[in-house]
Amino acid sequence: MARRGHDRERRVRKFLEDGGWVVVRSAGSLGPVDLVAMKAGFKAQLVEVKSTARGPWEHFKPADRQEMLLIAEQAGAEASLAWWPPRGSLQWLKSSDWP
């Protein structure tokens, strides 16, 4: 499972980089932010990547979402969840869409 998660992080990073974003991976932080993406003319993006089968919120609990929103607010950034389930496709969930 951890290997799939790391693979998904790398693939999301590549997806963003292919779109012209500069992406920094916060490896080992064990916090609610996996990637920080920046691009001239755009608001910085804080991205949490999940690859869970049971849904995007299975391991992205309310406390983690709140912490990520606080960090994003402090940084003047936007928060997003990149959910990429097994045998599924990448889905972007903006913080405004979170439960």
Image: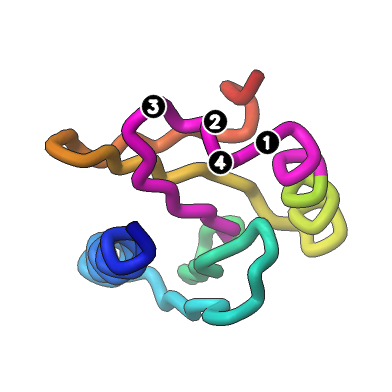
Measure the C-alpha gap from mark 4 to mark 2.
6 Å
Label 4 Cα neighbours within 10 Å, binned few <14 / some 14-19 / many ≥20: few
Label 3 Cα neighbours within 10 Å, binned few <14 / some 14-19 / many ≥20: few
Label 2 Cα neighbours within 10 Å, binned few <14 / some 14-19 / many ≥20: some
In the image, farthest residue toward the left: 87
**Mark 2 touches mark 1? (CB < 8 Å):** yes
Question: Residue at 21% of width from left, 68% of height from top?
Answer: 18
Dividing the image into 4 quarters, which one contains the N terminus? Answer: bottom left
Mark 1 residue type: Lys
**Mark 4 touches mark 1? (CB < 8 Å):** yes
Q: Position of residue 53 (x, y in %)?
A: 32, 33
> Which label belongs to residue 59?
4
Q: Which residue is mark 3?
A: 54
Q: Which residue is mark 2?
A: 57
Q: Is residue 95 above or below residue 7?
A: above
Q: Position of residue 84 (x, y in %)?
A: 30, 42
